[in-house]
Each structure stands twice: as structure tokens, then as C-alpha cells.
């Protein structure tokens, strides 16, 4: 098994430990962070390094700076969110150089490059949020939530779809192609819905994302059966594959509720249900399973090298 396919235990452990300390401090009332703030930091510290790779200390520094950005007033805080954007852009440049000419990319490679670009989009929205900039008549908390969604629904979910495509054979390949296409297309469609306040792109984007992650979840459950000799990987795939079904129904309902008179959860309740399940079970569980994957995995190492 290559270094790229190995579980980066020490690196992920250190990043996760730092995030746990932040959550503990928030729970103890030592710092003031909302659940959405904590999930953003979880993305920067843990999920994005697992999804797109890069040097662990870069991500740790970006997460630490972003944390400070939540502790100072909006405006100057944008400068502290900017290292996240720098790390994401550097990682995107590295990925494009590594993969070579785009004409030679397969669908899985293209999806992983797009996923890395979505990490940069997430970083740009977090910086916008902390600078206090409200563009195109989009306001908080939607700006910060866009950073959250491009981290998880954009980057992590698309990486999981690309990994499922790498492992798919026979009749499962069209399913995996559909998962990649739907998951890649959904984030900009949803964003267009918020900018235009249009029901079709907002609800349609939520439906596209739902179908995409449901297809990925189906493939993960299929792969769990094939991975039954590797108990931990199989368990992670099952957790990830089962976690996303009901929360995505909530997402479609919430999007529809912005245009029609139907009962929907509040944003804080969505964060506690839809958000937590997708972030910790679907995304984290799937990414950890990917790290424990077969040699066919396209997973990217998190390095601590200088």
C-alpha cells in the first residue's frame, strides 16, 4: 500500500485534536463560536486536508488563523481568514501541475481538480464573511453557510464521488458517473439560486446534490460489502452510506420552503441535523474509508514534510 493510500494517523490526529480543543473551549464558554463557526473550522482543520491533501501544517495554520478570525471584529477578521484562501489556491495549483494537461484527465481526475477548486471557493466565501462584505444582495448567514457548503457538499462530497467512480466496475460505472456529474454541477446551481432568488435553481440545485450524494452513498454501501474483510473500512462506508439519506430530504425541503409555504427547519436546526450528519458521518466517515482504501484509490496524501 502506497503512502497516498495510507491513513495519515498522526497528521489527522493532530488536526482533529486541535479542533476538539476549540470545541471544548466553545462549550466551556471560553470563546464564543456558533455551531456553524465550529463546522467551518472542522472543515479547514480536518475535512479539507483529508479530501484534497497538502501539507498538514499549512492547513493547521489556516485553521488557527481562521479561529482567530472568529474572535476579532468583522472587517479585520477577513485578514485572518485569508490564509485559508492562500492554502486552498496553492493546493489547487499543485494539483493542476501534478495532473498534467487537462486533455489527458479522466473524469475522476477532473472531478478531484474541481473539488479542490471548490475548496478555494469555500475559502473565498469565508474571507468575504469575515470581511463583512455583502455582494449581489446575499447576506449573512448565507455567506458563511456558502463556505460550509462548498467545503462539504462541494469538495468532500465530490471527492467521495470521484473515489466511488475509481472503484466502480461493470454496471456500477454509469451510477458512479452520474454521482460525479450531479455532485459537481449542484453547488454552482444552488449558488445561482441564492443570487437570483429563483426557485428553479435553488430547489433544483438541492435536488441535484441530493441525487448525487444518494448515488455516492449507494456505491459506498456496495463497496462496504466488497470490503467486509477490512472491518473498519466496511463500517466507515456503511456509516457514510447510511447517514446522508434523511438529511438531504431536509435540504430539499428547506430550499423549497424559501419559495412555497411549507414547514421547514430553522437554519440553526438545519445545522444541528442536516449539517452535523453530513459533515461528521457522510463526509468524515467516507473520507476516512477512502484513506483505508484499496490500491486503486486516488486519495491524496496529507504531508507533514517541510
Image: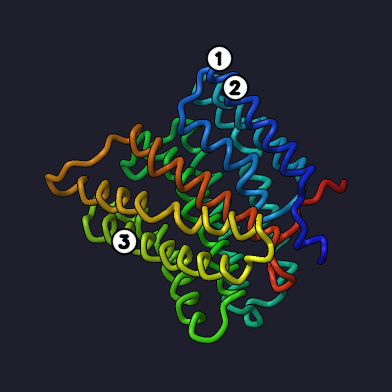
Task: Name the secondary structure under disc 3.
Answer: helix
Is disc 1 surrounded by few (<14), some (14 to 19) or many (20+) residues within 10 Å?
few
* Residue ID at (61%, 38%): 82
* Residue ID at (21%, 51%): 256
Q: Residue furthest bottom?
A: 170
* Residue ID at (64%, 43%): 46
Task: Name the secondary structure under disc 1.
Answer: loop
Query: Is the residue under label 3 in contact with that under label 2 (CB below 8 Å)?
Result: no
User: Residue 44 appears in which quarter of the rendering?
Assistant: top right
Of labels 2 and 3, earlier in sequence is 2
Residue carrying label 2: 24
Left-right relation of 17 to 166: right
Residue 62 % position (x, y): 67, 37
Left-right relation of 276 to 44: left
Residue carrying label 3: 207
Residue 156 % position (x, y): 55, 55
Task: Name the secondary structure under disc 2.
Answer: helix
Query: Is the residue under label 1 in contact with that under label 2 (CB below 8 Å)?
Result: yes
* Residue ID at (68%, 46%): 87
Spatial distance from mark 2 to mark 3, Cα to Cα? 35 Å
- Does residue 206 lie above or below 60 as drawn? below
Spatial distance from mark 1 to mark 3, Cα to Cα? 38 Å
Q: Which mark is residue 106?
A: none
Q: Which mark is residue 28?
A: 1
Left-right relation of 80 to 54: left
Residue 4 % position (x, y): 77, 62
Left-right relation of 18 to 256: right
User: Residue 11 appears in which quarter of the rendering?
Assistant: top right
Spatial distance from mark 2 to mark 1, Cα to Cα? 6 Å
Amino acid at each position: 500500500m502506497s503512502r497516498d493510500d495510507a491513513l495519515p494517523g498522526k497528521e489527522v490526529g493532530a488536526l482533529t485534536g486541535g479542533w476538539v480543543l476549540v470545541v471544548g473551549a466553545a462549550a466551556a464558554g471560553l470563546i464564543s463560536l456558533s455551531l456553524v463557526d465550529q463546522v467551518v473550522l472542522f472543515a479547514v482543520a480536518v475535512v479539507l486536508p483529508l479530501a484534497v491533501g497538502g501539507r498538514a501544517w499549512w492547513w493547521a495554520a489556516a485553521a488557527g488563523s481562521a479561529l482567530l478570525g472568529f474572535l476579532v471584529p468583522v472587517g479585520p477578521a477577513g485578514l485572518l481568514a485569508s490564509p485559508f484562501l492562500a492554502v486552498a489556491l496553492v493546493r489547487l495549483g499543485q494539483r493542476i501541475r501534478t495532473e498534467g494537461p487537462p486533455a489527458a484527465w479522466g473524469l475522476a481526475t477532473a472531478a478531484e481538480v474541481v473539488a479542490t477548486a471548490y475548496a478555494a471557493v469555500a475559502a473565498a466565501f469565508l474571507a468575504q464573511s469575515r470581511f463583512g462584505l455583502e455582494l449581489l444582495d446575499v447576506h449573512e448567514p448565507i455567506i458563511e453557510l456558502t463556505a460550509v457548503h462548498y467545503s462539504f457538499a462541494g469538495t468532500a462530497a465530490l471527492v467521495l464521488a470521484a473515489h466511488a467512480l475509481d472503484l466502480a466496475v461493470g454496471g456500477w460505472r454509469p451510477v458512479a458517473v452520474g454521482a460525479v456529474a450531479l455532485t459537481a454541477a449542484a453547488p454552482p446551481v444552488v449558488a445561482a439560486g441564492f443570487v437570483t432568488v429563483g426557485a428553479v435553481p435553488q430547489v433544483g440545485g438541492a435536488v441535484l446534490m441530493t441525487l448525487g450524494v444518494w448515488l455516492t452513498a449507494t456505491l459506498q454501501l456496495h463497496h462496504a460489502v466488497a470490503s467486509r474483510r477490512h472491518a473498519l473500512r466496511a463500517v466507515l462506508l456503511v456509516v457514510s452510506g447510511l447517514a446522508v439519506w434523511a438529511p438531504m430530504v431536509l435540504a430539499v425541503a428547506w430550499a423549497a420552503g424559501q419559495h412555497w409555504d411549507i414547514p421547514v427547519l430553522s437554519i440553526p436546526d438545519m445545522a444541528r441535523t442536516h449539517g452535523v450528519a453530513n459533515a461528521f458521518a457522510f463526509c468524515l466517515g467516507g473520507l476516512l474509508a477512502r484513506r483505508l482504501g484499496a490500491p486503486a484509490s486516488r486519495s491524496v496524501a496529507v504531508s507533514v514534510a517541510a
